[in-house]
Amino acid sequence: MIPRRAWKISLVMLMSAGTVMGGEKAAGTAGDGQKFSEDLFQNGRYEATLTSGVLFSPLIAEKSRPTFNYTMTGFQLGYMLSDVKGAEWLRGNVEVAGEGFGSAVFKGCGGYVAGMTGWLRYNFVPQRCRMVPFAQGGAGVTFTDIDHHVVGETFNFNLDLGAGVRCFVARNWSVNLELRYQHISNAHLNPVNLGINSYGPILGVSYFF
């Protein structure tokens, strides 16, 4: 069961973003969609994102893999590497981002998961639309006190995949929903390396500048 604290964090994020965005004029026409989405994805622009969600493991129930469910709260800073290019549904740009995250284990033997991830993201930027889908992949380092019979040691690596969509609600603000997969293991630095494969929803609020 998803803990109440995880949902409270998500609601606070949305309420805070709504308060800030209330002072800005929300774009409401198709023409405005072109203005507030495409310009923000040009080379040299930045994106700051606060995220919160929950991840569940294992992907497939197995007797050899214990259950580990944990929250996921992070901060990302992204940089647009390219201008918007392409045609039709492939139209978009490339973005690189760094993320720091912290988690609390709410089911399973352990208390925390924390680390850093580097992301490479492709943003699908349609014309005159406030919905901007994205797909991303990342890798980084993780520190955790999860049962060492599963991850072997405190220091581990993470590999991540994600796909989602941004919904622009104001000139520089979007609310994001993502489905994320995360793999945590020690890359055989320790003989014990069962690892964790988790998945779940991530809610985010982004500011573009």
Image (cartoon, rainbow, N blue to C red):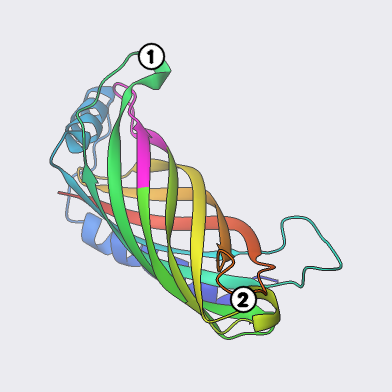
> Marks 2 and 1, Cα distance to the nearest angstrom?
41 Å
Please, is residue 17 above or below residue 120 in the view? Answer: below
> Looking at the magenta stretch, what is its main secondary structure?
strand
Residue 205, percent from left and from top: 34, 56
Q: Amino acid at mark 2?
A: Pro
Q: Residues within 10 Å of mark 2 (few under 14, many from 20)?
A: few
Left or right of 190? Residue 118 is left
| Residue placed most toward the observer, 85 or 38 | 85
Q: Residues within 10 Å of mark 1 (few under 14, many from 20)?
A: few
The mark that comes first in sequence, 2 or 1, is 2
Residue 30, percent from left and from top: 28, 23
Magenta residues, start to end: 120-134
Is 133 part of what is drawn in magenta?
yes
Q: Residue at x 53, y 72 (%)?
A: 6
- Secondary structure of the residue carrying tag 2 is loop
Residue 46, percent from left and from top: 18, 48
How many numbered tags mark residues here? Answer: 2
Nearer to us: label 2 or label 1? 1
Residue 5, percent from left and from top: 53, 78
Q: Amino acid at mark 1?
A: Glu
Is 106 part of what is drawn in magenta?
no
Q: Say if residue 84 shows up in the picture.
A: yes
* Residue placed under numbered mark 1 in the picture: 88
Please, is residue 55 above or below residue 192 in the view? Answer: above
Q: Which mark is residue 58?
A: none
* Residue placed under numbered mark 2 in the picture: 3
Q: Residue at x 28, y 46 (%)?
A: 96
